[in-house]
Image: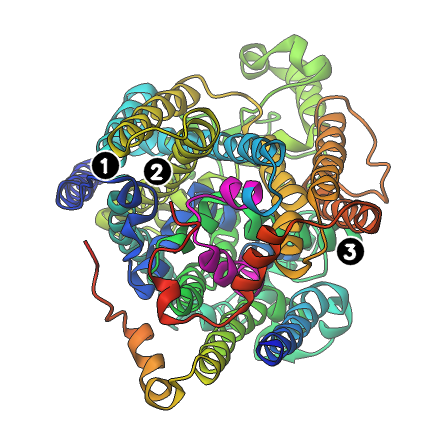
Amino acid sequence: MGIKDWTIIFVGASFTLYLVIAWISRVRDTKGFYVAGRGVPAAANGMATAADWMSAASFISMAGLISTMGYAGSQYLMGWTGGYVLLALLLAPYLRKFGHFTVPDFVGDRYSSNVARSVAVLCAIFISFTYVAGQMRGVGVVFSRFLEVDINIGVMIGMAIVFVYATLGGMKGITWTQVAQYWVLITAFLIPAIAISFKLTGNPVPQIGLGSELITGDGKGTGLLEKLNQINTDLGFARYTDAFGGDAMLNVFCVTLALMAGTAGLPHVIVRFYTVKNVKAARWSAFWALLFIGMLYLTAPATAAFARYYMIDSIDGKTQQELPAWFENWEKTGLILWLDDGDGKLRYSNRDDNEVFNKGGLTGPAALLGWDKIIGSQGAERKEALKLLNGQKKIRGPDKDIIVLATPEMANLYAWIIALVAAGGLAAALSTASGLLLVVSSSVAHDVYYRMINPEASEARRLLVGRGVIGIAVVIAGLFGIYPPGFVSQVVAFAFGLAAASFFPAIVLGIFNKRVGTIPAICGMLAGIGFTASYIIGQVYGGMEPWCFGIKAQGIGTIGMLLNFIVTLTLTPLCPPPDERVCALVDSARRPETAEDTAPAAVDH
Amino acid sequence: MQGYWRKNVTIMVVLLAIWAFVGLGCGVLFAKTLNQWHLGGFPLGFWFAQQGSIIVFILLILIYAILLNRLDNEYSGDAGKEELTATTESAGGTEETEE
């Protein structure tokens, strides 16, 4: 059986499983729809959180980024796991104690203001859609490569599945589907890593294999990391293990911190802690979540290093006849491209003689030529085109997204393992998409419709609106997948930056500082969002220089967050303190949980 | 309940200090210095950035959950009987799903 047959079996089986789970866990009330009836056990919630959190970006893109960036890629590893420490210590238990349904709900109640609530709703929706767009691209890439169907059909199949289990089961259906998706994606990530580690270093534990000596190839007897340093140096890249691979320390620091605070402030992650039974379970659940996430995140650096070794080893200096099959397979997708300068040998390097590219967006004089003309060029024309292409950093080298998906092929693993990776990529993308769509649904149906427009709405009506909104959201997300906005990868910086600059300070201060009132909090959020958004937009679209200490768009959320804290705390002594109701609310969150807290409280709608 | 809150904040501050030292310190700020030494086949700074920090993060949340849940039991009255079973109960996920 070939890769395609195996893929159909794995993808078909996993999709069927998701639908069966959806049918079993369908719900009848809003509590079930938004917070899974608050009855999810801690360990199961940990798995669901892990699947919710680990998106196509974690599964498909992250190892590719580390592979290309070397040490600087660690910012993603530390940022996306370190955020859970903030979440577990500063937010999760208290938010669970308040007992709301959504993040905007907390912001609106704590600062007793519908303006604050609306700002939070807009941020939640923006962050969610930004993220969903990225997931849909992941689904499209997997379908088009492994099932050789049109990307649009792939996206539609994916959306149909999400539509069924999200509208039927709401948070409850999503939770239990995510538990299943966690196991699909982690198996799919670990098996190839273990197989490759064994093949390359003789040690089946990838985390140890990463620091071991190679047992094959011309680098036999050399340490893997040492070999990578040597390869990178030869090809003109920065050494793999050197801090920070050509990036400035301040920049890496800011990106790491922005990702940490952003992670803690992402609404689809926070909302998962509303689904457990009590505060104690929320604390345990945070531990389980990071443990399950850690299984992938501790393996990703190994996958990244193995992929770097295989990729360069199997293509650099090869002729057309010698190139491996995976290269041709991926060439069809345009994510990797070889433009020979005439010597018949492929050269991948960080210098001007590089011949490997990905079909990204062209700018400047290269855009006037266009890809068709460049690919069709010969002789002197080709050399001129290569010069232009090598001036554009983003399209140099293969697309980072193919690294994880192509590594099993590079290492010549069995067809079924390659197919398993496809199913894992889909599980990662779909689980995150469904969690995000629920945030959109609850923000609109609960915070806007029920809390602001029609507080008299009956239970049945609210449930209907919730289902309707999630249905519409699925369709919009599907359109993002079919007509992908060209700026997806850039706006992801937005999602984290905004979460770090808006939600994180507002929630932390709301819990730990009783004096902060409505006006300072709103001003702080607006200052944080305004600064972060204008800086990112200016830099990404306006070609603005990174004037703020050379910090790039991805890391600016750190400064936005500081600005939010400073503005809020400076204005606080000048503005009236919050009323007694709010003080009592904060006090209640600071007391240990008793039996009566677990029963529905006043704020529990 | 001032005592409870103060202890809670102390635990939190200590754990967050470790978090900042290991993640932002060893992984980023002191990375160049740490890279002079090796841990097996890994330069030390590189190991902290890609392995060590994540392991420490997991342990920090584990310690926090154990300490805080114990503190909750101490202050919520019926400490004696719950304290011994709390950990295993929540960890094993034995709570019934309510419908």
State the residue lying farthest toward the bottom. B80
**Chain containing the residue with disc 1:** A
Q: In the image, residue A177 lies at what x, y percent? A: 25, 47
Disc 3 crowd rating (10 Å Cα; few below 14, some 14-19, many 20+) is some
Badge 3 and badge 2 both on one subunit: yes
Which residue has dot 2 on it? A434
Check the image and report above or below for A127 versus A173: above
Mark 2 and mark 1 lie on one chain; the one further toward the N terminus is 1
Figure quadrant of residue A524 = top right
Give the extent of the magenta segment. A81-108
Mark 2–mark 1 CB contact (< 8 Å) = yes
Crowding at dot 1, Cα within 10 Å, few <14 / some 14-19 / many 20+, comes out as: many
Q: Position of residue A419 (x, y in %)?
A: 25, 44
Question: Which residue has dot 1 on it?
Answer: A165
Q: Is residue A104 magenta?
A: yes
With A360 as the anchor, is A12 left or right in this view?
left
Q: CA distance from mark 2 to mark 1?
A: 9 Å
CA gap, disc 1 to disc 3?
44 Å
Image point (61%, 78%), residue name: B11
Mark 3: which amino acid? Answer: Met
**Residue that badge 3 annotates:** A249
User: Does the magenta-highlighted stretch encompass residue A571?
Assistant: no
